[in-house]
Amino acid sequence: MKTLLIPVDFSGTSSNVLKYAAEFSRDTAVERIILLNNYYLSIYEQLLPSADFVQMSADTINEERQKIDERLKSISRKLAKKCGPSIKIETAVSDLPLLRAIHQLIAQQKPHMLMIGSDNNRDESYIGEQVITIAKTSKVPVLIVPAHAKYKKIKLALVPCDFNAVSRLALLTEIRSSNQWLCPPELIVLNVDPKQAYLAHQEENLQALKEILESYQYQVYYSEDRDIAHGILDFANKHHAQLIIALPGNYSFFRNLTHRSITNALELNANQPVLILK
């Protein structure tokens, strides 16, 4: 059963992710969607009342949890209507901190993909604030949906690739063979290399690409933009890609950027979801 896990925090960013997920699920083989909310109280909030932390009684805590559970179920019913009867919608509420709650549910439910929203406003969504940490530590692929992105059927995907790690593209073959629920028919392979180091082994790299991506339609492009993130996003916009696929490993453009650079890139990216493979 193809399962999608979506952490929600009742923000506008989460609402947009759910709209995206509803349309996404109609075009793919998603069979189950799990909505996760974490209701976490630190020990300080429970035991140490102060100007910042007001001590809450057990009854108040239970009431708040019940409100969250009811709100989550209300959202799930609305999502079920949009997705249709063929897709099962489930809910989960955790007392753990967000990251631990996500990791625990991944271990228990084994979803095929995690879908989260990146928050351009920074202060609206606490999930959006942790999107980079979530994406880097998740053991399953993560689809990051920009706060204002609208769903478009995925026909063309951009794959930024350092040609020192062409072998990483083999993951796309695995997607084609085993996870056909998310399989773009056409790829653009983009090498962002301002030093043009790729020229030394260009023919070898092109031959390796031909062998690895033989089941795909694909084109290869090069960019000499000194700002890697800008080069990728600019290229994606100009070529109307519906998805950016980030490869894992030390040569991934996502790994090579600093935390600040990744944050800036996600803030600038208002159009294309980013799929981070694992």
Image (cartoon, rainbow, N blue to C red):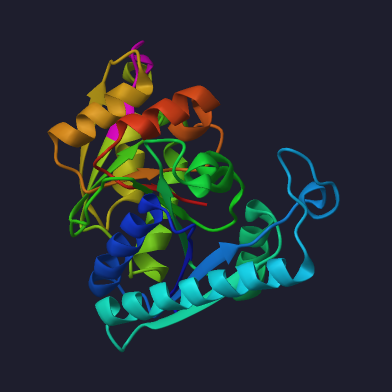
x, y percentage for residue 196?
Answer: 33, 14
Give residue 103's quadrant in the image: bottom right
| Image location of residue 270, percent across then percent down | 27, 38
Q: Is residue 268 left or right of residue 94?
A: left
Pinpoint residue 247: horizontal percent, then vertical percent.
Answer: 45, 43
Residue at 36% in and 32% down: 267
Q: For this rendering, which residue is in front, 106 or 50?
A: 50
How many numbered markers are drawn? 0
Q: Residue at x 66, y 67 (%)?
A: 94
Residue 28 shown in magenta: no
Q: Report if residue 186 is visible in the image.
A: yes
Q: Is residue 159 above or below residue 43?
A: above
Identify the residue at horizontal 30%, vertical 35% (top origin): 269
Q: Residue at x 78, y 64 (%)?
A: 57
Residue 161 seen in render: no
Q: Quadrant of residue 207?
A: top left
Q: Nearer the viewer, residue 168 or 241?
A: 241
Q: Is residue 84 above or below residue 6?
A: below
Residues shaded magenta: 190-197
Horizontal relation, residue 278 to residue 49: left or right = left
Give percent across and percent down for residue 101. Answer: 65, 61
Extreme residue in the right direction: 47
Q: Quadrant of the N terminus?
A: bottom left
User: As drawn, which residue projects farthest toward the bottom?
Assistant: 85
Is 192 a magenta residue?
yes
Nearer the observer, 169 or 256 = 256
